[in-house]
Image: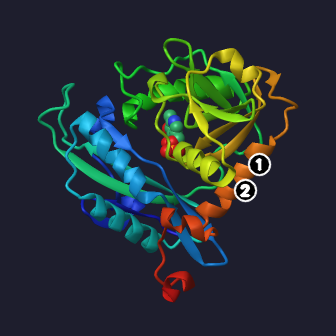
């Protein structure tokens, strides 16, 4: 099934969406991306786009950092994305990749005096971390500091930091890297936030430990509070706390909720998926597929022909 892109203000086949070799973002990493999931529900014959608006809110915030002026409003971006997904017509889980970037074909390191553009495309994409329990390693690469290249914004150039960590981990036969902040606190995975269960409570690193404020992270914090009456402590975590956690898991749009079985060759508890992690995985997987009416406000149905939309 062909994929499409919204590119240069119109929908085109993905294979026709090409940028020039002098495009500023290609040379200097002056772009911002998002990763959004569309989750296929075969019973409803529907793709539900999860927390669409929140992803574009984060993109707009990043645009302030990189001085990118988007030629679209938030509502327009949401509409374009839904139309794109509908046009693609996939009947499986998909990944939507918006990109706001410095589009001038002009060399010179800067953020000013450059034009900006926006594109978005969608592709089928199943599991990102293709394991039931991840084997992780603390990376030798530190997470970049907010005063170096702000991790708060999903700046394309920033992701060299994450790529160094991920490849080091995979080449050493691990599934994922856990990066520490410059001052040695636990920060996050190369594409996921991290949670521990300690003394029956959820703990996750705070914004000042150089994390991306993940939308899945926020979802988990809300679900733990609303569904299980569990508060999450956002506080600095030292490395050895990883080894002594009762449970540990990663969260991300691509990785969903992925349990961690082992870190630095040390099993987390008995190395199996913990009870709290399991409960969160179950409710999360129902919610993102539009199967939990209480959280339908987080799900945007993409297909008009769907029975769910026709019932409205
Ligand atoms: C570095 C990093 N941390 C965390 C996350 C998780 O964020 P979200 O849950 O919004 O996908 C991502 C993925 O977007 C990421 O790239």
Residue 237 in which image quadrant: top right
On screen, residue 90 versus residue 97, left or right, reads: right
Tag 2–tag 1 contact (CB < 8 Å): yes
Q: Quadrant of residue 106?
A: top left
Task: Give percent across and percent down for residue 267.
Answer: 83, 26
Q: Secondary structure at mark 1?
A: helix
Single out the residue that lies furthest toward the bottom.
311
Is residue 296 shown to the viewer in this render? yes
Q: Residue 96's x, y, as percent?
A: 47, 56
Q: Which residue is mark 2?
A: 282
Task: Name which quarter of the figure residue 124 lies in.
Answer: bottom right
Q: Where 257 sits versus 27, above or below?
A: below
Residue at figure coordinates x 61%, y 48% from the top left: 225
Please state if 282 lies on the left or on the right of 289 as rendered: right
Determine the residue positioned at 41% across, 51% down: 55
Q: Position of residue 56 (x, y in %)?
A: 36, 52
Q: What is the CA distance from the residue labelled 2 to the residue labelled 1?
A: 6 Å
- Residue at horizontal 39 percent and vertical 36 percent from the top: 156
SS of the residue under disc 2: helix
The quadrant of the picture occupied by the N terminus is bottom right
Q: What label sits on residue 278 in the rendered view?
A: 1
């Amino acid at each position: 099934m062909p994929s499409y892109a919204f590119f240069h203000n119109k929908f085109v086949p993905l294979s026709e969406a090409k940028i020039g070799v002098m495009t500023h973002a290609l040379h200097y990493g002056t772009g911002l991306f998002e990763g959004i999931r569309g989750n296929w529900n075969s019973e409803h014959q529907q793709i539900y786009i999860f927390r669409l608006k929140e992803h574009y809110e984060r993109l707009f915030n990043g645009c302030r950092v990189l001085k990118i002026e988007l030629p679209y409003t938030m509502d327009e971006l949401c509409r374009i994305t839904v139309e794109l997904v509908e046009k693609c017509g996939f009947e499986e889980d998909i990944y939507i990749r918006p990109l706001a970037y410095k589009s001038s074909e002009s060399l010179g390191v800067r953020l000013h005096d450059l034009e900006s553009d926006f594109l978005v495309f969608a592709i089928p994409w199943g599991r990102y971390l293709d394991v039931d329990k991840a084997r992780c390693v603390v990376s030798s690469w530190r997470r970049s500091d907010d005063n170096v290249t702000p991790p708060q914004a999903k700046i394309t150039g920033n992701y060299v930091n994450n790529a160094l960590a991920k490849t080091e981990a995979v080449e050493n036969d691990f599934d994922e890297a856990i990066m520490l902040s410059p001052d040695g606190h636990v920060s996050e995975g190369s594409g996921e936030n991290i949670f521990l269960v300690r003394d029956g409570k959820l703990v996750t690193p705070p914004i000042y430990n150089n994390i991306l404020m993940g939308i899945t992270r926020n979802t988990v914090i809300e679900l733990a509070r609303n569904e299980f009456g569990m508060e999450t402590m956002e506080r600095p975590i030292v490395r050895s706390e990883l080894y002594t956690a009762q449970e540990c898991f990663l969260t991300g749009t691509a990785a969903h909720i992925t349990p961690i079985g082992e870190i630095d060759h040390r099993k987390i508890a008995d190395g199996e998926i913990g009870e709290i992690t399991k409960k969160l995985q179950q409710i999360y997987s129902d919610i993102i597929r539009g199967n939990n009416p209480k959280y339908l406000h987080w799900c945007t149905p993409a297909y008009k022909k769907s029975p769910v939309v026709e019932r409205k």
